[in-house]
Image (tube, rainbow, N blue to C red):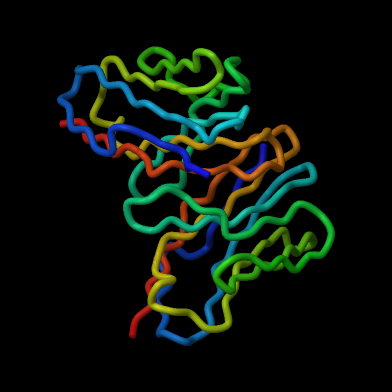
Amino acid sequence: EAGVAQSPRYKIIEKRQSVAFWCNPISGHATLYWYQQILGQGPKLLIQFQNNGVVDDSQLPKDRFSAERLKGVDSTLKIQPAKLEDSAVYLCASSLRGGQGEQFFGPGTRLTVL
Amino acid sequence: AQSVTQLDSQVPVFEEAPVELRCNYSSSVSVYLFWYVQYPNQGLQLLLKYLSGSTLVKGINGFEAEFNKSQTSFHLRKPSVHISDTAEYFCAVSDRTDDMRFGAGTRLTVKP
């Protein structure tokens, strides 16, 4: 089966610009996650969707970050405006269901904010 | 809320030597435990997981881990490593509410 797809793989922007990332989960996976992985750290959950509803966005900086999952399939994560500290790898993952279900990760988008 | 501590940020070993990557967790409830591996410029791949039952869990690529409830540990082991095992390894804990927390990672470097 096809894995989790993400694009773009790399993005370089200047601070205060906007950027968007796209994720296509594994077909049939109801749960979708966005993680932020800063260099030298483990992934930190930003937001979790169950179908097209938000389950957990407690760690999402809502003043600048937004995410949506229209129709319960693809998802986009947006940063507007970007700050230097947003430089990180943004990982998308999906699972059949939450809880003990294995999460399958995409290759990530490496964002550099100058 | 649960948390994970990976005790070693870097572990260098020689090829064919045994290795142990240490992981301790804290949680007030029953947990699920995971080890993921991340190769350069790739996403995370599940190595193994503990959900319940036997405390010794076997995973892919010859890795295994032992859940120790009294010591709140979930150390990852491999009896003989290969160059190809060079990667970043992440321990993660999830409670039954599906809130997964990752450790900071351990970089395993296998030298010839």
Residue A75, compared with residue B6, is above or below; it is above
Which residue is farthest front?
A: A1
The quadrant holding residue B79 is bottom right
**Residue at x 56%, y 54% (from the top left corner):** B46
**Residue at x 81%, y 54% (from the top left corner):** B52
**Residue at x 43%, y 15% (from the top left corner):** A62
User: Where is residue A17 shown, x and y percent of the image?
Assistant: 20, 18
Q: Is residue A98 left or right of residue A26?
A: right
Q: Is residue A11 left or right of residue B85?
A: left
Q: How many badges with numbers are in the image?
A: 0
In what quadrant of the picture does the C terminus of chain A appear?
Answer: top left
Residue situated in front as seen by the camera: A8 or B72: A8
The quadrant holding residue A84 is top left
The quadrant holding residue A19 is top left
User: Where is residue B14 shown, x and y percent of the image?
Assistant: 40, 85
User: Where is residue A13 shown, x and y percent of the image?
Assistant: 17, 27
